[in-house]
Amino acid sequence: MRIALSQLTTGPDPEKNLRLIEEWTRRAADAGARVVVFPEASMACFGTPLTPLAEPLDGPWADGVREIARTTGTLVVAGMFTPADEGRVTNTLLATGPGVEESYDKIHLYDAFGFRESESVAPGSRPAVIDVDGVRLGLATCYDVRFPELFRAHADAGAVGTLLAASWGAGPGKLEQWELLVRARALDATVWVAAVGQADPGTGPGPVPTGNGHSLVVGPDGTVQASLGADPELLVTDLDVDEVSAVREKTSVLANRRPEVWR
């Protein structure tokens, strides 16, 4: 399966960001990608007041993404914000395209490194997987990468890969953690992990997560198949779905689990 990771930098204007998504999706489709994955906060970057711009999944911004997916014949995965209770929003991944319509609300909120996502964002409560041409893929968002249970849940649901969208904050050690965690989650669940982040906007470390770039695709054995630097760039690569079963025959970490010990 050919996928594209669209490592761009979004701003505070959802309409301008939608036009970016259209431009990058067309580039990916021209390169033969079946799936195009955009970062977390594709609708609007963090640091923007989120409640006034949040829209439901049947609102105009999501419909704009659907139209882009329809006209290009691709599956588009993009981060947006939907309304929630108590004046908060939900950090949502929309996955839409021919034969696919799903959404995932970020379960693990980023209350770390001086930032409290839970003050403005309500947590999700269920994992989500999608089927694309007979291939099952899980959905995850940024801070989720620190929690192996979610990726194993994807594998238990039949997924051979996880699409991870992020707006990974800059700072000491953060780049090293990003690559280490993505590779570890691939090994934990013996799945492909395609991880796309916002490009580095060049503003330096701060309390609001922006972007660190360095999107990467990791195989089920933890090997980095493809990666990017810090700048805006499109990564197009092929996932060998059959490699998952081959790795699982050799490294039976899922079959060897003993969940009864941890109950």
Image: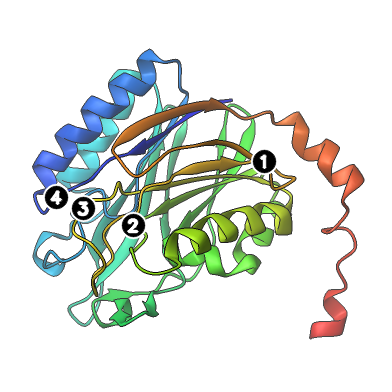
Residue at the spot 36% in from the left edge and 30% down from the top edge: 234
**Horizontally, is 73 left or right of 179 in the view?**
left
Question: What is the distance, in whole Å, between disc 4 and disc 3 at their CAs?
Answer: 13 Å
Residue placed most toward the observer, 66 or 29: 29
First along the sequence among labels 1 and 2: 2
- The dot on residue 66 is none
Which label sits in the foreground, 2 or 3?
A: 3
Tally of marks:
4
First along the sequence among labels 2 and 4: 4
Residue at the spot 58% in from the left edge and 70% down from the top edge: 147
Quadrant location, the N terminus = top right
Relative to 237, say whether 79 is above or below.
below
Mark 2 residue type: Ser
Question: What is the distance, in whole Å, between disc 2 and disc 4 at their CAs?
Answer: 12 Å
The answer to whether the residues at label 1 and label 4 have Cβ atoms under 8 Å apart is no
Residue placed most toward the observer, 94 or 219: 219
Relative to 203, say whether 113 is above or below.
below
Q: How dense is the environment of label 1, judged by Cα within 10 Å: few (below 14), some, or many (20 and up)?
A: many
Position of residue 58 measured from the top left corner of the image (x, y, whole percent): 24, 48
Where is mark 3, residue-wise? 202
Where is mark 4, residue-wise? 11
Mark 1 residue type: Gly
Position of residue 112 measured from the top left corner of the image (x, y, whole percent): 39, 80
Where is mark 2, residue-wise? 167
First along the sequence among labels 1 and 4: 4
The answer to whether the residues at label 1 and label 2 have Cβ atoms under 8 Å apart is no
Which label sits in the foreground, 1 or 3?
A: 3
Disc 2 secondary structure class: loop
